Amino acid sequence: MTKYVVAPDSFKESMTAKEVCDAMEKGIKIVDKDAQVIKVPMADGGEGTVDSLVDATHGQRITVEVTGSLGNKIRAYYGILGNGTTAVIELAKASGLEIVEKQKRNPLLTTTFGTGELIRDALDHNVKEIIIGLGGSSTNDGGSGMAQALGAKLLDKNNHQISFGGGSLNKLDKIDISNLDSRLQDVRIILASDVTNPLIGEDGASRVFGPQKGATPEMVEKLENNLQHYAKIIKRDLNKDIAMTAGSGAAGGLGAGLIAFTTCEMRQGVDIAIEVTKLEDKIRTADYIFTGEGGTDSQTKFGKTPYGVSKLGKKYHKPVISLAGYLGEGIDSLYSEGFTAIFGIIPGACDLPTALKNGPSNVARTTENIVRLLKY
């Protein structure tokens, strides 16, 4: 009996990682009816991390009402993994760019308060560990909203809480953490991110990521100055120097906020997923490994799911076959990293809506054809 491990990421806007797994299994079974297919939905800390890890561990989703990026009430969910003691949260569910209409995107105003509310709800479920995916943020508030949601007081000169958004950080006069949720001290917090940018400077949150969130050049300079001020107050009041810490610029500075107000560690998202899903144990005894993502190019080797899977395949001398919705520049550099072969799944010219709609059938057909060659 041939053993296949299928460990793809989601294909954005087309399929969840679990749906990709199902499509790959379907293609394999058409050719190899007796195959053993081990399905491991994966993620790298970005969109789909909650769904992938919940599905992989047979956990549950918790839906709550939280504060959206612009202060409106929204419904968002997070996951509790199958062990019952680990929560997994995506910042993007409560404070993400995709949930803000394009014309309303404004990092002077957007807040991470809702992400803090998700953390608080997870604490209410008595978890011992919280994994936070930092991808897809609409914010540039340095995690100040998150801290406020967890009980920190970010006060102006009149002892009033400062307003939401990166545009209000210049009003910060002092930080009072006497009411910060004490349960944070007893929980392990892991930040899932492949971003190593510092909070401030040319490579910082405002200048690199601000424009992607709707910031004009003038707004970028205001946000940069405000985060510099925020970092100085944190250093003075919390004795933590987060300005140039690697990863502190992730998610508009939420990385900095979590470093400042909690005890946390930062890891690549795919490494966390590999650990949670026990993927290495499964790959060790596999005959073939299938992985994939929406688009593969030279950036894949900077912490994306297929790269993490390929490293394990290389370690155990197993063939790794990767599928993608599109193939970009630089994939030649991936073959020395553990990839055996990389295939695009689109059969011919078509528009994007059609490609997204036909994702499952395209994955199944491509997988089927690969297995026909493998079994020849």
Image (cartoon, helix red, strand yellow):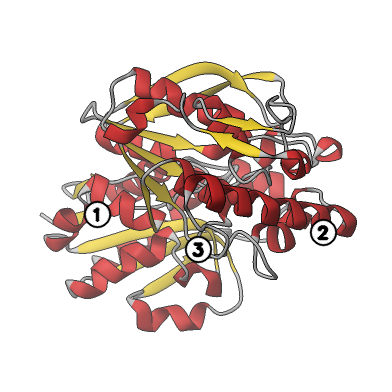
Comes first in the chain, label 3 or label 1: 1
Q: Position of residue 308 (x, y in %)?
A: 35, 64
Q: Is residue 94 visible?
A: no
Which residue shows up at 32% across the image and 49% down it?
A: 273
Reply above or below: 47 against 334.
above
Dividing the picture into quadrants, the one containing residue 171 is top right
Q: Is residue 171 visible?
A: yes
Q: Amino acid at mark 2?
A: Glu
Reply above or below: 331 against 164.
below
Residue at the spot of label 1: 5
Q: Position of residue 327 (x, y in %)?
A: 57, 68
Packing grade of label 2 (10 A; few <14, some 14-19, many >=20) is: some
Q: Quadrant of the N terminus?
A: bottom left
User: Which structural element holds mark 3?
Assistant: loop
Comes first in the chain, label 2 or label 1: 1
Which residue shows up at 67% across the image and 45% down it?
A: 354
Distance in Å between CA atoms under marks 3 and 2 = 20 Å
Which residue shows up at 71% across the image and 24% down it?
A: 71
Q: Amino acid at mark 3?
A: Thr
- Report if the CB atoms under discs 2 and 1 are less than 8 Å apart: no
Residue at the spot of label 3: 245
Distance in Å between CA atoms under marks 3 and 1 = 37 Å
Distance in Å between CA atoms under marks 2 and 1 = 48 Å
